[in-house]
Image: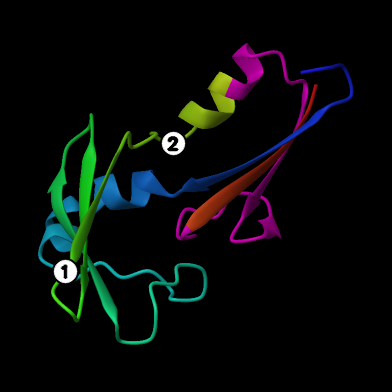
Amino acid sequence: MKPGGVLLIDERNYQRILDNRDAALKGELHSSGKYLYTGINNVRAGFLSITDDGILVQYAHKNGKKAYYYGHPFKKGEMLELLKEAGFSNIEQYSDYEPGENPEADFYQYVCIK
């Protein structure tokens, strides 16, 4: 990235999921519903597996079709540290589009200037 370039990153609050993995696997951990959209009563999302190395989510449409997402669950502060290691010196963090860090947020956003 050129000096002065801007990188925007949106990160799921995986630490909240990891800290509440039993509730998440039972379907008892819910997002606020304000930022994750899977359609009105058409798609159900559920965690199938949660480990420190990976999270597997199933998306099931009411028509019977299924899709899966597998991703690395960044731990608290891990993404921020990676951004600093990559040379970003000016990093602003947001929680559900509000400035700062909120451990109960559904998503974190980063505005990074090289």
Q: Residue furthest bottom?
A: 41
Q: How many marks?
A: 2
In the image, residue 57 sits, relative to residue 1, either above or below, namely below
Q: CA distance from mark 1 to mark 2?
A: 22 Å
Residue 4: name its quadrant: top right
Instruction: Name which residue lies at 33% across and 37% down.
Output: 73
SS for callout 2: loop
On whether residue 87 falls in the magenta region, the answer is yes
* Res 76 label: 2
The part of the image, by quadrant, that contains residue 33 is bottom left
Please say whether residue 112 is one of the residues in the magenta stretch: no
Residue at 31% x, 70% y: name it.
30
Region in magenta: 83-106
Q: In this image, 93 relative to 64: left or right?
A: right
Residue in the picture at 38% in, 69% down: 31
For label 1, the residue is 27
For disc 2, the neighbor class at 10 Å (few under 14, some 14 to 19, many from 20) is few
74 left or right, relative to 105: left
Q: Amino acid at mark 1?
A: Gly
**Horizontal and vertical percent position of residue 69:** 27, 48
Q: Mark 1: give few (<14), some (14-19) or many (20+) Cα within 10 Å.
A: few
